[in-house]
Image: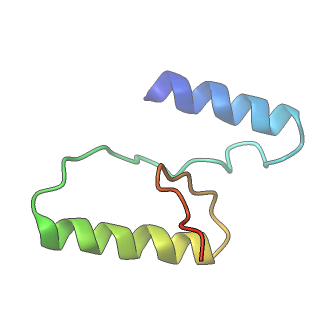
Amino acid sequence: MGIAKKASARVLSDAGLAALGGVWAVRCGVRPIRDRTHQLALVRYVRAHARQGAAVWSQLRKQSP
């Protein structure tokens, strides 16, 4: 994870799309989801950050109306 974070931050900084050191949170960690309650809390957390302007990638496809 560290190498990917370093490389992506460098590319974004070099392209002028992000401030140096402004791409990733400090000490972000990867932890397994414990249960359904934890999963739903995580979804709410990610959606809140997306509303604040964070870039979020999803594997879910939008359903057509």
Coordinates of residue 51 in the picture (x, y in percent): 61, 77
Q: Is residue 60 above or below residue 48?
A: above
Left or right: 52 in relation to 46: right
Residue at 88%, 36% (x, y): give it.
Answer: 15
Residue most toward the left? 35
In the rendered image, residue 6, in percent from the top left (x then y), is placed at: 59, 28
Tell me which residue sits at (68%, 70%) in the image: 53
Q: In this view, does 28 lie above or below 4?
A: below
Q: State the residue at coordinates (46%, 28%).
A: 2
Residue 25 rendering spot, x and y as whole percentages? 51, 52
Seen from this angle, which residue lies furthest right?
Answer: 16
Q: Which of 15 and 25 is in front in this view?
A: 15
Up-down relation of residue 40 to residue 54 (above or below): below
Quadrant in the rendering for residue 64: bottom right
Looking at the picture, how far across and down is residue 30, in whole percent? 30, 43
The C terminus: image quadrant: bottom right
Between 44 and 18, the one lying in front of the other is 44
Left or right: residue 10 versus residue 57 is right
Looking at this view, is 56 or 7 the one in front?
56
Whether residue 31 sits left or right of residue 57 in the image: it is left
Question: What colouring does the structure picture have?
Answer: rainbow
Q: In this view, does 51 lie above or below 58?
A: below
Residue at x 55%, y 51% (from the top left corner): 57
Q: In which quarter of the image is the N terminus?
A: top left
Q: Nearer the viewer, residue 43 or 63?
A: 63
